[in-house]
Amino acid sequence: MQTEKIGVAGPTHYFQRPDGIIYTESFEPTVVTKEVFIANFEFIKKIASEKKEPVKLLINFTQANKLDKEAKALIKSSYLNDNYGQYIEAVALLTNSRLSTLIGNFMVGISKKGPNKYPIKIFMAVPKAVKWLDQL
């Protein structure tokens, strides 16, 4: 499937899939920091604002190998959802290890805080994640 690279935010590369889903991936092991989260959510806001609608995200979280203390605190707050939730329609997180699944579970917490709730689900295979996003 052809994808078009649409940008980079911190260690994360963003691609537009033909089906409209935004695919993200980091190509090397990444420590997820507060700054990384905010840079990525700002980029998502930019994409959604240009599209004039919330986006569906397919986030490849397989290279996330640690959340630092500030990132964990940010996730536990409602800040990300309060400020960026309206730009997200749904998120499918791809994981391939216990650690990336654990970090993904922290991400699930973001979607449950604040007024802008959106569905988020963890997957280990792209086809299942895409099928779920397409059904929404």
Image (cartoon, rainbow, N blue to C red):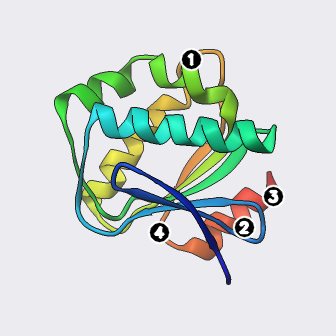
List x then y, in percent, for residue 31.
21, 49
- The residue that disc 1 covers is 82
The label nearer to you, 1 versus 2, is: 1
- Residue 40 bears which disc, if any? none
Q: Nearer the viewer, residue 115 or 37?
A: 37
List x then y, in percent, for residue 129.
62, 64
The disc, 1 or 3, on the residue closer to the chain's N-terminal end is: 1
- Residue 131 bears which disc, if any? 2
Looking at the rendered image, the quarter that the N terminus falls into is bottom right
The residue at the point 27 percent across, 59 percent down is 98
Q: What residue type is labelled 2?
A: Lys
- Contact flag, marks 3 and 4 (Cβ < 8 Å): no
The disc, 1 or 2, on the residue closer to the chain's N-terminal end is: 1
The disc, 4 or 1, on the residue closer to the chain's N-terminal end is: 1
- Marks 1 and 2 sit apart, C-alpha to C-alpha, by 28 Å
Q: What residue type is labelled 4?
A: Met
